[in-house]
Image: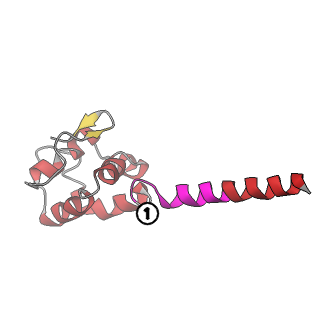
Amino acid sequence: MEAPMKYVCFLGLLLFVCIGANGAGECGKSSPDNEAFKLAPCMMAAQDPNASVNSNCCIQVKKLGQNPPCLCAVMLSNTAKASGVKPEVAVTIPKRCNIADRPIGYKCGAYTLP
């Protein structure tokens, strides 16, 4: 009787860990790849440091910038890479949008937000 109880406890713990991991990512319950689609208005600005940043891009970056780990995860996501985003350029967007409360100095992988 003791062995089945240990087995049930182990399964319960495993289930708890799995559920917690799925709901506690950098972007909460949404994946960075899903959040990356919200930054579609930033496409040109994330590829070319001389491109102008449109207001829709700045609005989305400001929202994601409230959660710096999520913003970084989005900028470094597979979706962003597949779309041609250059992380070294993407990290400059909050500054180019003149977002006053941006996470200056935040480490984003190998990059630092200016």
* Residue 60 rendering spot, x and y as whole percentages: 23, 63
The front one of 108 and 44 is 108
Residue shown at the point (88%, 52%) measured from the top left: 3
Which residue is the extreme one toward the front?
2
Residue at image coords 11%, 48% = 95
Side of 77 where 4 appears, left or right: right
Q: Is residue 43 left or right of residue 96?
A: right
Q: Give the vertical position of 76 relative to 18 (above or below).
A: above
- Colouring chosen for the image of the structure: secondary structure
**Does residue 23 show up magenta in the picture?**
yes
Label 1 neighbour load within 10 Å: few <14, some 14-19, many 20+: some
Stretch of the chain drawn in magenta:
15-27
Q: Position of residue 103 (x, y in %)?
A: 19, 48
Q: Amino acid at mark 1?
A: Ser
Name the residue tied to disc 1: 30
Viewport quadrant of the C terminus: top left
Residue at horizontal 17 percent and vertical 50 percent from the top = 93
- Give x and y (percent) for residue 35: 36, 61
Q: Main secondary structure of the magenta part?
A: helix
Q: Quadrant of residue 62?
A: bottom left
Quadrant including the N terminus? bottom right
